[in-house]
């Protein structure tokens, strides 16, 4: 007896069936997931995709039809968040090659650019994405203003948004010093001198920001910790509240 | 007692007046032959309708007699006439009565206006996915061709000329040329952020339509343009000593 020969396509589909039928696979993907066996496009499954996944923390099962139109939001809020994620990923990459001391910082960046695979690309992406994020957060705020989307019941979410804008500026500004080149040093000098004119506490504010009387290794360490840990941590908390409030306040505003 | 809607009440009154006029007119003209008009005088049903129903009744009587004479063949018509609605007339010979007018809202309590919604998957998620993919591609390609600046090692003893803050603070640095540093560096940006936070509580106008918020929109636009112009001047039109230069003759003094 000769067994009928299986075609490669049959083998593949058999393998897919086997994998999708396995316990491990079904323990990973919950019912309704598009990766489960026999997913069909039905209203029920469309609901399950959101409801049975971590996305349910971010999106409701259904959204207003006009909220999907790109021309309404221009995706600015979502893109700001995406840039934040992109900056986190590229930033973690950069952290592997960087030591925040005046003696090593500039050399580390230089070595990263010249002898680390994809080092230059990662640094470029981090830099440009940071500038883009400042821009997109600004534009997001303008979009929200022009749509009157800060009006009740969304007043407090606007307040959180303004806090997030200042946090974005802080993230960008603290990162500015880290390459420890002439551009970084003097941009930060200009910035912190300005802060030093705070009424009454001017000198103290400047001392806290610089970690001393002058910009040096202590400043670098201080701004490094602020940049990679403290400000992102605070930002993530406010982002969570921001997104949660969008849903609690009845989805995005509008239509006009 | 249920309140009768204004427009229905008016319509009923108009109909009543019209009927009164019509029944009064034939009564004057054909006073001797007022056999039909006499009962219609106190009726609210127009005379021509009464006449029509009277003729219909007499016709029915005629067919009934016809059926009675034709013994076998006219069963169907006999049934039909038997099934004709019983002439249950109310007082004054009325054939219809208006029981009451109930407004829709008093029996059906509609809680919320139905909103046109679509499933988040695939409609919104697809848009978000494509937008983030495009953004990623843009940042990546831009980073391949444009390198982030890395100037010479930081040197506290060598001040570059000009020394500029990051671009989003160049508006403030521009203000420094006009005001005392405390005003330009602390008071104005502080007030700006404070006013932004308060925006939803200052703007009491409930509408989000652009035509209703001309003042708010123009105020915000003027503010944004003011800062944008300052940033552009600070970025491109300021050279050594932070003096005015034209970028097309003196070149760019700007690093991102």
Image (cartoon, coloured by chain):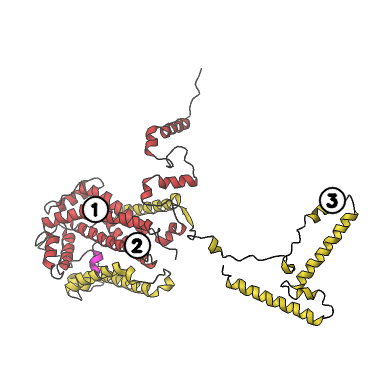
Q: Position of residue A46 (x, y in %)?
A: 46, 47
Q: Quadrant of residue B83?
A: bottom right
Q: Quadrant of residue A161?
A: bottom left
- Judged by its main secondary structure, the magenta piece is helix
Q: Nearer the viewer, residue B18 or B243?
A: B18
Q: CA distance from mark 3 to mark 1?
A: 91 Å
In the figure, B196 relative to A120: above or below?
Answer: below
Q: Are marks 2 and 3 in contact (CB under 8 Å)?
A: no
- Disc on the earlier residue, 2 or 1: 2
Q: Position of residue A50 (x, y in %)?
A: 41, 47
Q: From the image, which quarter does the N terminus of chain B lie in?
A: bottom right
Residue on which disc 1 sits: A233
Q: Is residue B47 within the magenta segment?
A: no
What chain is tagged by disc 1?
Answer: A
Q: Residue B75's mark?
A: 3
Write down the colour of chain B. Answer: yellow
Circle nearer the viewer, 2 or 3:
3
The 10 Å Cα crowd at callout 1, few under 14, some 14 to 19, many 20 or more, is: few
Residue on which disc 2 sits: A140
Secondary structure, mark 3, is helix
What chain is tagged by disc 2?
Answer: A
Secondary structure, mark 1, is helix
Q: CA distance from mark 2 to mark 3?
A: 81 Å
Magenta range? B164-171
Instruction: Label the red chain with its letter.
Output: A
Secondary structure, mark 2, is helix
The 10 Å Cα crowd at callout 2, few under 14, some 14 to 19, many 20 or more, is: many
Q: From the image, which quarter does the C terminus of chain B lie in?
A: bottom left
């Amino acid at each position: 007896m000769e067994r009928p020969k299986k075609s490669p396509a049959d083998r593949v589909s058999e393998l897919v069936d086997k994998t999708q039928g396995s316990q491990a696979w079904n323990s990973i993907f919950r019912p309704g997931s598009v990766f489960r066996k026999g997913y069909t496009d039905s209203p029920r499954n469309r609901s399950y995709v959101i409801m049975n996944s971590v996305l349910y923390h971010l999106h409701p099962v259904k959204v207003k039809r006009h909220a999907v139109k790109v021309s309404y939001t221009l995706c600015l809020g979502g893109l700001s968040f995406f840039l934040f994620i992109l900056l986190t990923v590229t930033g973690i990459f950069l952290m592997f090659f960087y030591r925040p001391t005046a003696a090593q910082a500039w050399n580390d960046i230089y070595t990263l650019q010249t002898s680390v695979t994809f080092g230059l690309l990662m640094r470029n992406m981090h830099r440009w994405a940071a500038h883009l994020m400042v821009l997109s957060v600004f534009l997001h705020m303008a979009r929200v203003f022009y749509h009157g989307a800060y009006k009740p019941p969304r007043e407090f979410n606007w307040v959180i948004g303004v806090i997030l804008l200042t946090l974005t500026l802080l993230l960008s500004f603290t990162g500015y010093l880290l390459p420890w080149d002439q551009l970084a040093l003097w941009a930060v000098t200009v910035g912190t001198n300005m802060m030093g004119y705070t009424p009454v506490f001017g000198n103290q504010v400047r001392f806290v920001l610089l970690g001393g009387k002058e910009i040096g290794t202590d400043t670098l360490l201080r701004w490094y910790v602020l940049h990679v840990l403290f400000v992102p941590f605070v930002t993530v908390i406010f982002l969570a509240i921001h997104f949660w409030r969008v849903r609690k306040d009845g989805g995005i505003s509008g239509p006009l | 007692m249920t309140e009768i809607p204004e427009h229905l009440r008016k319509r009923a009154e108009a109909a009543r007046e019209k009927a009164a006029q019509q029944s009064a007119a034939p009564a004057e003209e054909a006073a001797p032959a007022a056999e039909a008009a006499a009962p219609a005088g106190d009726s609210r049903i127009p005379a021509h309708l009464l006449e029509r129903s009277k003729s219909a009744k007499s016709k029915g009587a005629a067919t009934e007699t016809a059926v009675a004479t034709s013994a076998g063949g006219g069963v169907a018509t006999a049934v039909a006439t038997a099934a004709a609605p019983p002439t249950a007339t109310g007082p004054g010979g009325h054939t219809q009565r208006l029981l009451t007018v109930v407004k829709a809202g008093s029996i059906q309590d509609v809680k919320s206006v139905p909103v046109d919604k679509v499933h988040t998957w695939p409609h919104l998620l697809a848009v978000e996915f494509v937008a983030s993919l495009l953004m990623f591609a843009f940042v990546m390609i831009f980073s391949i061709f444009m390198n982030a600046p890395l100037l010479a090692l930081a040197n506290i003893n060598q001040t570059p000329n000009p020394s500029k803050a990051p671009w989003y603070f160049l508006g403030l640095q521009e203000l420094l040329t006009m005001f005392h540093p405390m005003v330009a560096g602390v008071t104005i940006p502080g007030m700006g952020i404070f006013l932004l936070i308060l925006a939803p509580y200052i703007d009491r106008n409930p509408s989000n339509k652009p035509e209703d918020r001309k003042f708010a929109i123009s105020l915000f636009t003027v503010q944004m343009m003011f800062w944008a112009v300052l940033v552009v001047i600070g970025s491109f039109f300021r050279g050594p000593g932070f003096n005015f230069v034209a970028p097309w003759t003196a070149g760019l003094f700007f690093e991102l």
